[in-house]
Amino acid sequence: MSHPVLTDRCRPFAQYLNLVKALGLYPYFRPLSRSFGPEVEINGRRLVMIGSNDYLGFSHDPRVQEAAAAALRRWGTGPGGSRFLCGNLTLHEELEARLAAFVGKKHALVHATGFSTNLGAIASLLTPKDLIFCDRENHASIFEGCHASRGRLIPFLHNDVEDAARKLAGAQARRAPGSLMMLLTEGVFSMSGDLAPLPELVRLKKDYPDLLLYLDDAHGLGVLGPGGRGTAMHFGVTDRVDFIMGTFSKALASVGGFIAGDDDETFMYLKHHSKTLIFSAGLPASCAAAVLACLDLIEEEPERIARLWALTRRAHAGYQEIGLVTGAGRTPVIPIVIGEEEKAARVAADLFDHGVFALPAVFPAVPRGRAVIRTAFMSTHEERQVDFVLEVLAGIADRHRIRAADLAEQGNGPVMARQQAPL
């Protein structure tokens, strides 16, 4: 039974969504009938997938699948309760030890999703008297954790260390006794592909020795650093980063997340106070086993990461040759800057019609008026598939006028300042 006030509240958005669908421009929640990794099947059509976070292509590796199946047979399809009660498996604790060692920390705590990791960890670590310095383009889960903590949220301009320093200096004098200051950033930003200026952020600790650094490395784990060990390892600053958060739904081909750090008492506290851990069912054994298998393969087959980077460079060079604007990042996330949200939806629809699956990122996932088509290739893509995507994009660039010169002519000139440097 509908409630008139609630219905009235939701109606404007529903009407807008119905209009977008009627125009054939709604790109989200497409049901995949089958996935082959680099390609997917939708309504009987095969499309090249360039929107997946499965960077290393492990989700279709037979060894990963078998590890998940074996764990399912041993522990069942679900844990039957939260880890706090009856759902804590030996597999969870094995995975935590493995993850902590992988990212260079003493402890790790596994949650059921990456979102719930950020929400539960940040909310339990911070209190209303604490000061939280947050990059404006951080993931929604980080902001939800900050809001749940009820600490004082102080955003700083994206990847702007000077702005972060100004905000720190301004807030320092007004700190409550016994309060904490925490700065939170992503390692690889999920929509732009930007790499955080982590060494410069770490240097802020010289002036603020008690500043805590929290790194969400969802898109850096398995991709950056020696052996795919993440953004902190990439920059050689692991010992200066207090908390490293990662997810399993990207390079580790599963579902779940973890937070890692060094302080014994803090992790004992987190394990008993993170509400999203205590009040959620434990991670299914099949998911945990898949992650362990992926970690094995990352160590045994470093060529996977090398191939990912080779394909990324190939795709990026192709984008540049076409004349596309691809942002400032130097990571496997390559956004194609479009500008207007409606135009991005039209570009995505045209890509779909021509056999390429890639989705638009619009506000609030990216700044308003800076919509992009977010693309990312996998180590299991074949060169013929990359060539096909580039051929399709060249035609779309003509039809939709999305080359750099077109964007400048249309008034999107500032976008050029963030043109991506060569990989």
Image (cartoon, grey):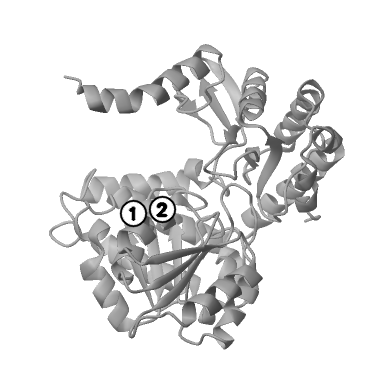
Which of discs 1 and 2 lies nearer the camera? The answer is 2
* Picture coordinates of residue 214, whole percent (x, y): 46, 70
Left or right of 102, for residue 288 = left
Q: Disc 1 designates what residue?
A: 116
Q: Residue at x 70, y 39 (%)?
A: 336
Disc 1 and disc 2 in contact, CB within 8 angstroms: yes
Answer few, some or many: residues within 10 Å of disc 2's Cα (few below 14, many 20 plus, some between 14 and 19): some
Q: Is residue 414 above or below residue 389?
A: below
Using the numbered discs, state the Cα–Cα distance from disc 1 to disc 2 in whole angstroms: 8 Å
Q: Looking at this view, is 244 or 387 the one in front? A: 244
Q: Nearer the viewer, residue 115 or 129?
A: 129
Secondary structure under tag 2 reads helix
Residue 122, by quadrant, is bottom left
> Which residue occupies 32% across, 48% down?
286
| Residue toward you, 256 or 291 | 256
| Residue at the spot of label 2 | 141
In this rendering, the count of numbered labels is 2
- Residue 357 image position (x, y, % from top left): 60, 29
Three-letter residue code for mark 1: Ser
- Give the residue at the far left of this rendering: 85
Question: Looking at the picture, how far across and down is residue 397, in whole percent?
Answer: 79, 28
